[in-house]
């Protein structure tokens, strides 16, 4: 059977005129063999990145849609909520007790998963400083029925809705930690976040990195959106979780074939000293900007379908044992 030919994507010339001379792959450190802090490239203040004009262009493409306006208004209300100052009375508990409480508070406020990792310097973007030593990771799961419409409006609305949810969870956690007398900073998963979120999510046990460059979780597949809180509250860190994603992704081509711009490669690449799955930034960005954030790769990922991850894990485990 002949392979389906993708329709050729032709970027808007107005957008392409804003492309900087430097490659986004170069900014990201593609091919670099030494570990370093990442450079700001997208979702930061426009003046910090050569791709700032493209970010501004992207925001101007948001359609005049009531659903989009509603979730944007909800997120603005969440961001306007003030986190109270740190209580002068510092509560004392064991790290184990604090860890159980943090996870309980996070889940009660809407998180799908809560994890904890010790903050590594290379996770902090080079133009920022993060004053605390521990990062509490928050994951929220998207509705697959909405996600699978990508790159149409319902999927984009769902992405914003879940980022708002992540902001609400992270702000609730920071508020609660302040009430216990400990410092904390809420970093929701969108807009000027000073640290990379996928590396600590991998470190604390949220899952493995998929070929599409996003997390794959053993329960929620590729549907997760992330947020974070940094703090000095004494906590117990989690462990990485491996269940065979690499073996699966090497042979699966769902996201690779689904990508409209062939931005997803067949093999891992070296990026700032790490051999990892990597999505070509320069190929991905134009389509992303013109299609409300795209998310096709997540929608077509077999791990995203409800009920599928557990079956895939069983099959991978059986394959490894034979």
Image (tube, grey):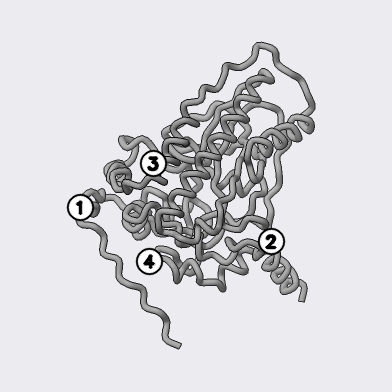
Please give left or right for residue 101 compared with residue 279 in the image: right
Residue, disc 1? 14
Q: Residues within 10 Å of mark 4 (few under 14, many from 20)?
A: many
Residue at point 51% right, 25% down? 81
Give the mark nearer the N terminus: 3 vs 4: 3
Q: Nearer the viewer, mark 2 or mark 1?
A: 1
Residue at point 45% right, 71% down? 257
Give the mark nearer the N terminus: 4 vs 2: 2
Give the mark nearer the N terminus: 1 vs 3: 1
Give the mark nearer the N terminus: 4 vs 1: 1
Res. 40 visible in picture: no
Residue, disc 4? 260
Across and down, in percent, residue 13 comes to 20, 56
Q: Residues within 10 Å of mark 3 (few under 14, many from 20)?
A: some
Residue 97, by quadrant, is top right
Closer-to-camera residue (316/6) = 6
Query: Which dot marks residue 259?
Result: none
Residue, disc 3? 69
Q: Nearer the viewer, mark 1 or mark 3?
A: 3
Residue, disc 2? 243
Across and down, in percent, residue 96 comes to 78, 33
Give me the C-alpha separation between circle 2 and circle 1.
Answer: 44 Å
Secondary structure at badge 4 equals loop
Give me the C-alpha separation between circle 3 and circle 2.
Answer: 39 Å
Give the mark nearer the N terminus: 2 vs 1: 1
């Amino acid at each position: 059977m002949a392979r389906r030919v993708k329709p050729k994507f032709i970027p808007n010339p107005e957008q392409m005129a804003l492309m900087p001379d430097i490659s986004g792959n170069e900014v990201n450190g593609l091919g670099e063999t030494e570990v370093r802090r990442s450079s700001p490239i997208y979702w930061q203040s426009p003046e910090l990145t050569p791709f700032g004009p493209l970010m501004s262009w992207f925001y101007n493409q948001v359609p005049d849609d009531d659903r989009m306006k509603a979730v944007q208004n909800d997120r603005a209300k969440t961001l306007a909520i003030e986190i109270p100052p740190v209580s002068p009375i510092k509560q004392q508990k064991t790290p184990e007790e604090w860890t159980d409480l943090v996870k309980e508070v996070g889940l009660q406020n809407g998180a799908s998963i809560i994890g904890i990792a010790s903050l590594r310097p290379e996770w902090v973007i080079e133009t920022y400083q993060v004053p605390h030593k521990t990062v509490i990771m928050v994951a929220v799961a998207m509705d697959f029925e909405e996600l699978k419409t990508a790159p149409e409006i319902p999927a984009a609305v769902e992405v914003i809705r879940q980022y708002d949810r992540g902001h609400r969870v992270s702000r609730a956690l920071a508020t609660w930690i302040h009430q216990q007398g400990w410092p904390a900073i809420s970093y929701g998963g969108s807009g000027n976040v000073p640290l990379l979120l996928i590396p600590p999510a991998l470190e604390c046990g949220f899952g493995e990195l998929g070929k599409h460059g996003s997390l794959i979780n053993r329960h929620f597949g590729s549907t997760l959106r992330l947020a974070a809180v940094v703090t000095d509250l004494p906590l117990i860190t989690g462990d990485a979780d491996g269940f065979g994603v690499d073996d699966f992704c090497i042979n699966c081509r769902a996201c690779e074939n689904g990508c409209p711009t062939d931005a997803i490669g067949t093999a891992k690449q070296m990026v700032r000293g790490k051999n990892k799955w990597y999505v070509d930034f320069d190929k991905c960005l134009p389509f992303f900007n013109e299609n409300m954030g795209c998310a096709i790769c997540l929608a077509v990922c077999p791990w995203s379908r409800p009920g599928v991850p557990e079956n895939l894990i069983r099959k991978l485990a059986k394959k490894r044992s034979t």
